[in-house]
Image (cartoon, helix red, strand yellow):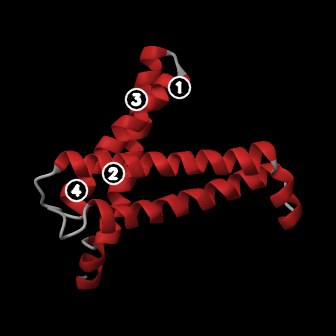
Amino acid sequence: MEKLKKVAFSEGFKYLFFGGLATVVYIIFKFLSYQATQSGWISEIIAQACSIIFAFFTNKFFVFQHKSVNLFKEFISFVTSRILLLLFSIGMNAFFIDAHPEILMREFGISKNTLVALLNLFLQVFIIVVNYLVSKFIVFKRNNA
């Protein structure tokens, strides 16, 4: 029981737990804002903004338990890193799915649907890891004042 408690309160588990909740926030706001606007891209912006704001505050106060006086600087760093990774993901999709799917399809002997699934799985894992590292060592680093 003590080991389970240790895992449940570990930083990594809390990061994944609150990341899951951020995903729920995204889904709820995507649905509600789409119903209100009937626009895919407007509802996407609203949902992404709400989930990033939620993720920032849960990471700051619950995951990394970071105390600082420069909330604005941390927020800008957090949002910037999320936007850069979003652009990276868009670029990878544009290159490997839209422009040159044959590169990976031929190399791995897979269909385009399998390529889409595997690339998205890879990108999601990569982004989760990079977001964690950026949050821990840049945005919410311990000596950050």
Badge 1 or badge 3: first in the primary sequence: 1
| Amino acid marked by disc 1 | Trp
User: Which element carries disc 1, helix, strand or loop?
Assistant: helix
Looking at the rendered image, the disc whose residue lies closer to the viewer, 2 or 1, is: 2
| Amino acid marked by disc 4 | Lys
User: Which element carries disc 4, helix, strand or loop?
Assistant: helix
Separation of residues labelled 1 and 3 (CA atoms): 9 Å
Badge 2 or badge 3: first in the primary sequence: 3
Residue 115 on image: x %, y %: 76, 55
Badge 4 or badge 1: first in the primary sequence: 1
Q: Can you identify the residue that label 4 sits on?
A: 60
Q: Which mark is residue 41?
A: 1
User: Which element carries disc 2, helix, strand or loop?
Assistant: helix
Badge 2 or badge 1: first in the primary sequence: 1
Q: Nearer the viewer, residue 35 or 140?
A: 140
Q: Can you identify the residue that label 2 sits on?
A: 78
Residue 132 on image: x %, y %: 38, 64
Separation of residues labelled 2 and 3 (CA atoms): 17 Å
